[in-house]
Image (tube, grey):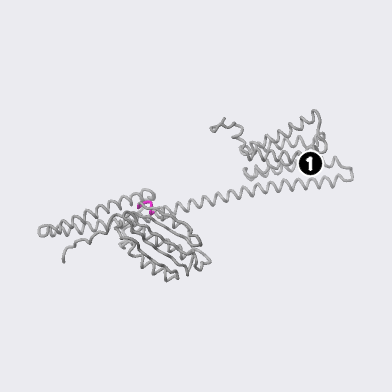
Amino acid sequence: MDGEGRPSWLSRATAVDVALAASAAVVDVFLFSAVSSRTPEGAGLWLFTALVAVGFAALLVRRRHPVLVFGVVWVWAVLVTPTSELDFEPTAIPCVALFTVALRGQLRVSAGALLACAVLAVLAGLREAASRPPEARLVATYATLVFYLLVYGCVWAGGRWARLSRQHAEDLEFRRRVEAHEAVIGERTRIARELHDIVAHSVTVMVLQAAGARRVLDNDPVRVGHALGHIEEAGEQAMGELRRMLTALRLSYDDEGSCDTVTGRPQPGLADVEHLVGTIAAAGVRVHTRVEGEPGRLAASVDLAAYRVVQEALTNVTKHVGPGAQVDVRLRWEVDELTVEVTDDGRGRRPERTLSTNHGLTGLVERLAIVGGRLETEPVPGGGFRVTAVLPVAGPVASEPVREPR
């Protein structure tokens, strides 16, 4: 008995194997023997039944031992075919065994199996010639030989084609997984680089605030208190961004230990969406933006992630939908989360050729997971596509920092 309480023999021979073996046995009995016109009697009937049972039983384990099963079936067919008393020429059972070897075995092994089946074709031709008058033996031999060679050849070719198709599908799936993995790793590396810039910016703000507080320490304690508050806030933000950066680096650190330096360029955020919309509009895509709710305060990495969501969604519209499409960009602010929703109507002039790796959304999923958000994508009824991102909100909009007077 197996783990599910089924008999052990049933676990070795699936329902498909049983059905296929039974079908092959039935075809051989009724099409390649004289049982339908002259039923064996007595010992002949028992012998015929035993021989058919041998072929049926052999096919039940063809998946696990394809070469061994073919060898058994081939010997069985070689012994059965010349026996005129049985009038039995097994064909379907050897075909199933040959197909399995062609599907699961190497080319050299399957080619040997095909040559072995040529022996069965010759035996069938000789047996057919023995049952015909002398003047018809030559034609009967050639006709039978050609028939069986064609049958075995087509079965072998079908098995090899199925094997190559399966290998091709596995190769495509492997390449898809590798490309998706590389896209995720690339996005993590990019996130780590951007977070490095954000942390550097936060530390710079802390240094400047501390320097300003030190200069007015004796003259303006109130201003010093404000500066210390901003230093505390920037420090907390820097620690949060540092944890995210270390998460990304831990997942995608390269073996060479290389790292990127601070770019010196400010990272984009939701404040730059209008400029992005103008760029997309120049490509012929009509974009409408709307903001719902009271805007809250976002961590720098979350603000960057929100911008990347809008950027990737609009870029996909230009690539896959084309000019003439209409896009709605909605920012819905709530107390503890921001929902970014980008929806297109799918009614643009689609480009004839799309230059895309189709892994941009995979990278976005990774980016949002690092900052504590999530991404959802779905087609829109009637055409179009919707990208929805939910991001955490740090709190209400912070007041402007108090700067040292010049």
Q: Please give the count of numbered marks on the rendered protein.
A: 1
Say which quadrant the N terminus sits in. top right
| Three-letter amino acid code of the residue under disc 1 | Ala
Percent x, y of residue 295 = 31, 60
Depth check, front residue: 187 or 290: 290
| Residue 196 quadrant | bottom left
What residue is shown with label 1?
A: 124
Where residue 239 sits in the image (x, y, percent)?
27, 51
Residue ranking furthest to the left:
218
- The residues colored magenta run 367-371
Query: Is 105 in front, or is 310?
Result: 310
Give neighbour class at mark 1: few <14, some 14-19, many 20+ (Cα, 10 Å).
many
Quarter of the image that includes the C terminus:
bottom left
Asked if residue 244 lies in the magenta stretch, the reply is no
In the image, taking residue 79 as reference, residue 62 lies left or right, namely: left
Q: Which quadrant of the figure has residue 327?
A: bottom left
Q: Residue at x 46, y 66 (%)?
A: 318
In this picture, residue 197 sits left or right of residue 280? left
Q: Residue at x 61, y 47 (%)?
A: 163
Residue 368 part of the magenta segment: yes
At 45% from the left edge and 62% from the top edge, which residue is drawn? Answer: 316
Helix, strand or loop under label 1: helix
Residue 335 located left or right of residue 362: left
Magenta residues, dominant SS class: helix
Q: Quadrant of residue 361?
A: bottom left
